[in-house]
Amino acid sequence: MKRNTILIFTVSAIILLAAATAIGWKVGRGNSNALWEIVSEQCVPNQQHNGKPAPCLEVNLAEGYVLFDDRNGPYHDLLLPIDKISGIESPELLQQNRPNFFMQAWDRRGHLSREAGKPIKDDYLSLAINSRYGRTQNQLHIHIACLRPEIYQTLNQQFPTLSADWKTLPVKINGHIYLAKTLTANELTQSDPFKTLDRYAQQRDESIGKYGLAMVSTPAGEKVLLASSLDVFNMSLGSVEEIQDFSCALAK
């Protein structure tokens, strides 16, 4: 039995690594810099020279970000830095003078309500950034979208059990292991979620690049961080975007 279990784990790991390789090959065949090219070659120059952010929704040069309406929608926006920052693993995110991109993304959530033509409750919404291994683009981008209805229900059952310390959720989300913690006001505004997760990863002698990171809100307005890591045995690439629903069924 033990030998069979080891064999199953080994085969699963090989399958996942093959999938990851296939994803990387697909990106390589396409253009993993497509978002960066849109930001740097279209949105920012158009704002600077013509005062218009197109094809982005917004270009904020002072605060260092753009807001982009992802075509994989209809209710799906991306917040991206105007500087070249590859992703969650980038050391630039830990610098003291960097903008708080998570806070900026949360502040831009109102665009989804305008697209929907009605207010979308904060606890229906989520922010997500995939791990280094679970993304298709090499420019940092935070997904702004609604939660999938079943994920919303699962999280609401777990919220009362959470604290300011990271804990593993007792239930899997989409078959994957997730960590969760509540956010203090200081962690969201004076620090930022990237630094919060990086401290956890360093304590475990791990790289933050293994992790995908998400932020959600409880019905009472408290913010909660979710994280999921690359895990070959659980068939996870740390792609936390999986919790999101770009059609926003919760608001219908």
Image (cartoon, grey):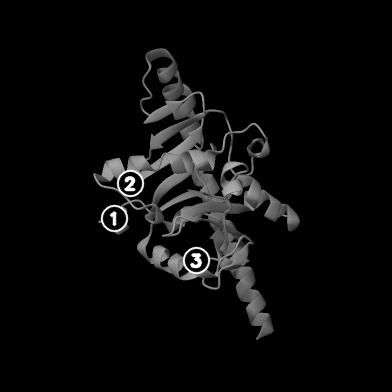
**Which residue does the image show at 63% across and 43% down from the upper left?**
191
The location of residue 187, given as percent across then percent down, is: 61, 48
Image vertical order of residue 51 relative to residue 33, above or below: above
| Quarter of the image where one finds residue 56 | top left
Looking at marks 1 and 2 on the same chain, the residue that comes earlier in the sequence is marked by 2
Looking at marks 1 and 3 on the same chain, the residue that comes earlier in the sequence is marked by 3
Q: Secondary structure at mark 2?
A: loop
What quarter of the picture does the N terminus occupy?
Answer: bottom right
The location of residue 145, given as percent across then percent down, is: 39, 49
Amino acid type assigned to the residue bearing label 1 in the image: Ala
Label 2 Cα neighbours within 10 Å, binned few <14 / some 14-19 / many ≥20 = many
Amino acid type assigned to the residue bearing label 2 in the image: Tyr
Spatial separation of the CA atoms under disc 1 and disc 3: 21 Å
Spatial separation of the CA atoms under disc 1 and disc 2: 11 Å
Marks 1, 3: nearer the viewer: 3
Q: Which mark is residue 35?
A: none
Which residue is disc 3 drawn over?
159
Image vertical order of residue 8 relative to residue 64, above or below: below
| Quarter of the image where one finds residue 167 | bottom right
Amino acid type assigned to the residue bearing label 3 in the image: Phe
Label 1 Cα neighbours within 10 Å, binned few <14 / some 14-19 / many ≥20 = some
The location of residue 119, given as percent across then percent down, is: 29, 48
Residue found at the far top of this picture: 49
Q: Which mark is residue 251?
A: 1
Looking at marks 2 and 3 on the same chain, the residue that comes earlier in the sequence is marked by 2
Q: Secondary structure at mark 3?
A: helix
Left of 48 or right of it: where is 19?
A: right
